[in-house]
Image (cartoon, rainbow, N blue to C red):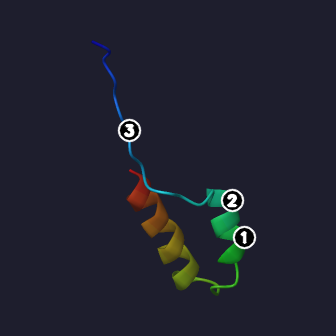
């Protein structure tokens, strides 16, 4: 009897790639909100 563990994950995009795509979201508050929400999502 073999014991097996299956692990399922979501497909993700590398952070560096995502940040390069979103660099044009604007300055100031919008950019800070975007980064803080991203950090919240990974904690």
The image quarter in which residue 3 lies: top left
Q: Image point 46% across, 59% down: which residue? A: 39
Task: Say left or right for 24 vs 32.
Answer: right
Label whose residue precedes the other's in the sequence (3 or 1): 3
Q: Are marks 2 and 1 in contact (CB under 8 Å)?
A: yes
The image quarter in which residue 13 lies: bottom right
Which residue is labeled 1 in the image?
Answer: 20
Q: Image point 27% across, 12% down: which residue? A: 1
Q: Position of residue 43 (x, y in %)?
A: 38, 50
Instruction: Please determine whether, in this image, residue 32 is positioned above or below residue 26.
Output: above
Q: Position of residue 5 (x, y in %)?
A: 34, 28
Q: CA distance from mark 3 to mark 2?
A: 25 Å
The image quarter in which residue 15 lies: bottom right
Which residue is labeled 3 in the image?
Answer: 7
| Comparing labels 3 and 1, the label whose residue is closer to the camera | 3
Which residue is labeled 2 in the image?
Answer: 16
Q: Position of residue 24 (x, y in %)?
A: 70, 84
Q: Secondary structure at mark 1?
A: helix
Residue lying at the far front in this picture: please name it: 1
Instruction: Please determine whether, in this image, residue 13 is positioned above or below residue 31.
Output: above
Q: Position of residue 11 (x, y in %)?
A: 50, 57
Most foreground residue, 20 or 34: 20
Label whose residue precedes the other's in the sequence (3 or 2): 3
Q: Image point 53% across, 84% down: which residue? A: 30
Image mark for residue 43: none
Q: Image point 65% across, 77% down: which residue? A: 22
């Amino acid at each position: 009897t073999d014991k097996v563990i299956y692990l399922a994950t979501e497909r993700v995009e590398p952070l560096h790639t995502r940040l390069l795509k979103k660099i044009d979201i604007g300055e100031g508050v919008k950019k800070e909100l975007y980064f803080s929400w991203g950090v919240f999502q990974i904690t």
